[in-house]
Amino acid sequence: MQTRAAVLREMTSNRPFDESRPLSIETFELAPPQAGEVLLKVHAAGLCHSDLSSINGNRPRPTPMVLGHEVAGTIVQAGAGVERFREGDRMIVTHHVPCNACHYCLSGHHTVCDTLRETTFEPGGFSEYLRVPAINVDRGVFTMPDGLSFDEASFAEPLACVYRGQRRANIQPGQSVIVLGSGLAGLLHINLARAMGASRIISTDMVPARLEAAKNLGADFTFLATDDIPARLLEVNNGRLADLVIVCTGATQALQQGLESVDRGGTVLFFAPTEPGVNISVPVNDLFFRNDATLTTTYAGAPGDLATALEMIGSRRVQVDEMISHRLGLEEAGLGFQLTAEAKSSLKVIIQPHGGA
């Protein structure tokens, strides 16, 4: 069958992207699903910062390619041997799935599995239709709860990443949490930390509108990122720094603030990449002799995290609808990338290849 998609032909840092037009809307043939595969009609695909890093060249990828991996849609055809799903089922689909058999999977580190880094669907989420490989159908396709919109369901993949991060950081009820950077990932962390029982949540950002969104989603206190964050923390957190620091920006200042904002026995979760080549100094002696702090990173989410994330969205324990700032058609994908790059008026951009139908 034929599908239309937003195709990235060449990476570029020339902005605005809606004028430099690195994406072109193209029509091409998509092979029917083979044994074990399904064909999905894409109703909603979230635009992620990792997509942006591919389009601007910070994360080089082979081109041409179709970006988009936060996908919700409807099965329109199932290949031979597919028994769990059928035509008309409303699903979320993840592009990366683990092997479930290697050393890393068996030790609970599914997201560093080689298979997870290599798997994907064809052609990508910013397409009218996509073909889901058998391995993804086996462990990366989940039925949407009743009453959940496709736009909301597309948050399952980013929330799964956030959930895994907080799980790895061993978040506990009653802890104080500071989120440095209140973009989409930061807002999800704030929302989830509240659902997980955090007693006090603080957020920072450079953009006042994002701080307002952080308040609406559960932050008790918000500060401009240019403030003396450790000092402000002591003021609002009973003279203590934070039990859990979540760094959701790759800005050097925020990375340093993260190390300076963690309380004794606390944890710093680095949840965002930096620009290529960026390094910071780590005060090992302070951490060793005084803080007893844990530093950790996470990437992606495992299938179990996806199932939990979808349940939390479906039960409304995590509210995502008000994070959607823009709903755009396929032809407006370039504008979506520009809005995300500007990081001013946008929170979450959803691409609707069929115009919300």
Image: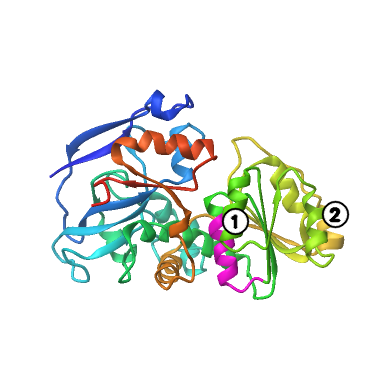
Tag of residue 214: 1
Q: Residues within 10 Å of mark 2 (few under 14, many from 20)?
A: few
Chain part drawn in magenta: 186-198
Q: Position of residue 145 (x, y in %)?
A: 33, 71
Which of labels 1 and 2 is toward the front? 1
Decide: is 180 above or below 168: above
Residue nearest the viewer, comparing 231 with 99:
231
User: Secondary structure under badge 2?
Assistant: helix
The residue beneath circle 2 is 285
Tell me if 316 is positioned left or right of 284 in this view: left
Q: Quadrant of the N terminus?
A: top left
Can residue 60 be spotted in the picture?
no
Q: Amino acid at mark 1?
A: Ala
Spot occupied by residue 136 in the image (x, y as percentages of width and height)? 31, 59
Q: Are marks 1 and 2 in contact (CB under 8 Å)?
A: no
- Is 333 covered by the magenta stretch? no
Name the dominant secondary structure of the magenta segment. helix
Q: Does 15 sit above or below residue 82?
A: above
Q: Residue at x 38, y 60 (%)?
A: 152
Left or right of 122: which side holds 300?
right
